Image (spheres, rainbow, N blue to C red):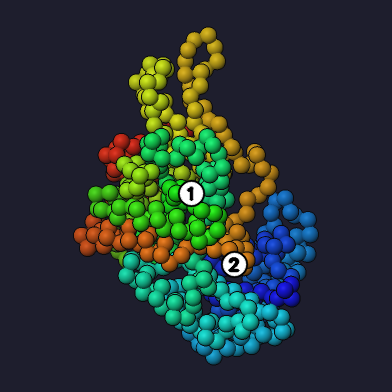
Amino acid sequence: ENESSVSITVVGASGDLAKKKIFPALFALYYEDCLPKHFTIYGYARSKMTDAELRNMVSKTLTCRIDKRENCNEKMDQFLKRCFYHSGQYDSQENFAARDKKLKEHEGGRTSNRLFYLSIPPNIFIDAVKCASLSASSGNGWTRVIVEKPFGRDSESSAALTKSLKQYLTEDQIFRIDHYLGKELVENLSVLRFSNLIFEPLWSRQYIRNVQLIFSEDFGTEGRGGYFDHYGIIRDIMQNHLLQILALFAMETPVSLDAEDIRNEKVKVLRSMRPLRLEDVVIGQYKSHTRGGVTYPAYVDDKTVPSGSLTPTFAAAALFIDNARWDGVPFLMKAGKALHNKRAEIRVQFRHVPGNLYNRNFGTDLDRATNELVIRVQPDEAIYLKINNKVPGLGMKLDRSNLNLHYAARYSKEIPDAYERLLLDAIEGERRLFIRSDELDAAWSLFTPVLKDLEEKKIIPEYYPYGSRGPVGAHYLAARHNVRWGDLGTDVDH
Ligand code: BG6
């Protein structure tokens, strides 16, 4: 059993994702002794490269955690010796057959387990899957394929992609990544909710007034415009990352922590949601802005973006779950590029305390009297709960304070990158954090109608300056549902 081998083939090895995330994550796993004894890593791509050149390229991407600097160079050298390069076309069964031969040589008769990480554009997905499956599958162990979004661009194209994938792979061989599920605080969401008596009973319409899922980046599409323009922020961030968080947040208690039990609950809650309508959505696009003598470009200034593009780089949306637990509770999402900060967080705003004795001590701003739980996914991970307390002294003045679990202060360990967790799970066959095909279908059903509408009606996005807080339309949308965005208030978060 320990005489089995694992080979990881990174298809599209010279791409951005491979360099930024996949190789560094594999090295981190190696450093943490998480990889099996007999593992080998292969870069596969079209360009000609020697093993030494690949190693050189990979070595530039590797870093050690701050708390693990010891032996770092030595570990890197050992790791790089396990990395090889294979040049080939993505649609050539012959080239993949050569891959198979090389894999067999390295496996040396051990049980062969093979993981293919497809880090390539969607138009060549299927060809690569076909070749990997028909010409380079393992004969006596498992073969798994990790795929990255985009999984189509609407219900139809996504279903077509799934159908093609399933010609060559079974569902349990397909590992669809949503890297937000590998983030530490997203994983902690279930722990927080299901293992704390002070939260679990509150998790419903009875006590929660609204939930906000917020994603912002302080940079634009910067060179990724070609990809981005075809998808837009709703498909890039909302339909996957934010919706996945929402599903985990709102699902019913799963029977167990097994992957299928969790994914069953996620599908259930997604299927209880109302598909979005045009009036539930606000879209925006960033325009050029000059500040402090520096001019920041508009989205359409990106050379890879067609001029006059209406693709949204910002969106806000109000979603509803029509089940007993969440009836009437607005789930508000907001996602944007080129905003004033980089942040991902979940905000839970609770209802008023009925008949609060201290109401008059809050003055007119009763909103301030409600509790809010904030889960800051990144940066500077934290979970904090806003509570009311008395300002010390002889008077009776109330104040808002945070009970704060600030990760950097609580844990000296560096938090692993999402890709480390996900790659490790894929190697171990743990499917909990990967997207099942029925989940994907349910997610697309929610967004497809409104995406079609936006495109067909050529809805003009609201233009917002690069580096701003985004379009004011987001406030009106929230206000229609009696919601105030929590991230724009005065948040004392330390
Ligand atoms: C990706 C999107 O899925 O997530 C990018 O395609 C986005 O547009 C990225 O920048 C954000 O990921 P992270 O982990 O940096 O927050």
Which residue ends up furthest to the left in the rendered image?
Answer: 457
- The C terminus is located in which quarter? top right
The answer to whether mark 2 is within 8 Å of ligand 1 is no
Residue 447 place in picture, x, y as percent:
32, 58
Which residue sits at x=73%, y=84%? 108
Question: Nearer the N terminus, badge 1 or badge 2?
Answer: 1
Which residue sits at x=55%, y=87%? 135
Callout 1 crowding tier (Cα within 10 Å): few <14, some 14–19, many ≥20? some
Contact flag, marks 1 and 2 (Cβ < 8 Å): no
Q: Residue tagged by mark 1?
A: 253
Above or below residue 193? Residue 133 is below
Q: Measure the alpha-carbon separation of dots 1 and 2.
A: 23 Å
Q: Is residue 411 left or right of residue 373?
A: right
| Residue 139 visible in this rendered orientation of the protein | yes
Given residues 189 and 391, the one toward you in this image is 189
Q: Residue tagged by mark 2?
A: 429
Q: Amino acid at mark 1?
A: Thr
Given residues 172 and 70, the one toward you in this image is 172
- The N terminus is located in which quarter? bottom right
Residue 468's quadrant in the figure? top left
| Residue 185 visible in this rendered orientation of the protein | no
Q: Secondary structure at mark 2?
A: loop
Which residue sits at x=75%, y=60%? 72
Given residues 169 and 48, the one toward you in this image is 169
Which residue ends up furthest to the top in the rendered image?
Answer: 394
